[in-house]
Image (spheres, rainbow, N blue to C red):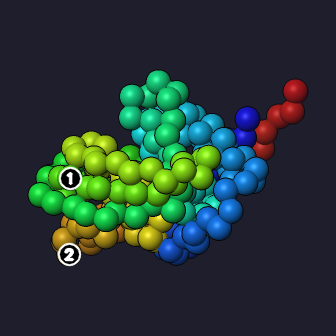
Amino acid sequence: MTIRAIRTYGDPILKLKSSEVADINGSVAHLIEDMKDTLRNSETGIGLAANQIGADKRIFIWDLEGEDDFEVLINPEIVESQGEWEYEEGCLSVPGLHWTIVRPKLVHVKGFDLDGNEVSYEADDLFGRLIQHELDHLDGKLLIEHLDKDQLKQAKSTLRAMAMGELIKEEESAAKPSRGL
C-alpha cells in the first residue's frame, strides 16, 4: 500500500494538462492502486485525478459511496453535456474550502477501463459533477477557476493566509527542540 501526498493549490503540476496514457500496463495498474490507497486515506474525497498525486497521466478514479468500490477512467473525454446545476463543491487540492459552482447537470463521458475496454457513462447530479471536476484536474484547471472575480480574489487571499499559517506552524515546530525517547 502506497499513500501518496495529495498536491495542493500552488503546486505546478495542478496547472498542467495531463498526458494521455499510451499503454495500459503494470505501471498504470500500480499507479491506480496508489490512487485508491490515497483516496481511501483522504476520508472525505470521492474522486482523485492522477496529477493530484504528482502523476502526469489522464486517469481518474472515484468511489461515490465510500464503500471501497473504486471505478477508473483512463483518457476520459466528455462528448456531450446539457443543463445546469449549482452545487457546493470542494476539492482535496484546495482543502477545507467549498464554493457553489455552476456546471452542466448531465454529461456523457467516454474513456477506457483498466482492461483497455472502451467505456461510456451518462452521468448527472453528483456523478456528473465528479466527472467534470476530475476532468478539470486533468486539463490543469482547479475549481477556483469557476469562481467569479470577487470570489476568486477572496479565495486566493484565504489560500495565501492558509499557506502562511502552515509556514508559521512549520517554523515554530522546527524552532522547538524535541526530546528523543
- Residue, far front: 117
When asked about the image quadrant of residue 157, the answer is bottom left
Q: Marks 1 and 2: which is nearer the front? A: 1
Residue 5 in percent (x, y) is at 63, 50
Residue for point 57% across, 34% down: 41
The amino acid type found where label 2 is placed reads Lys
Residue 36 in percent (x, y) is at 59, 39
Mark number displayed over residue 58: none
Answer whether residue 127 is visible to the viewer in this image: yes
When asked about the image quadrant of residue 109, the answer is bottom left
Quarter of the figure that contains the C terminus = top right
Residue 59 in percent (x, y) is at 54, 57
* In the image: residue 80, left or right of residue 113: left
Residue for point 27% across, 42% down: 126
* In the image: residue 84, left or right of residue 181: left
Residue for point 61% across, 65% down: 21
For this rendering, which residue is in front, 88 or 156? 88
* In the image: residue 164, left or right of residue 103: right
Callout 1 crowding tier (Cα within 10 Å): few <14, some 14–19, many ≥20:
many
When asked about the image quadrant of residue 180, the answer is top right
Callout 2 crowding tier (Cα within 10 Å): few <14, some 14–19, many ≥20:
few
For this rendering, which residue is in front, 77 or 99? 77
Q: Earlier in the sequence, mark 1 or mark 2?
A: 1
- Residue tagged by mark 1? 106
The amino acid type found where label 1 is placed reads Leu
Residue for point 60% across, 47% down: 114
- Residue, far top: 67
Answer whether residue 167 is visible to the viewer in this image: no
Q: Which element is circle 2 on?
A: helix
- Residue tagged by mark 2? 149
Q: Distance between the residues labelled 1 and 2?
A: 26 Å
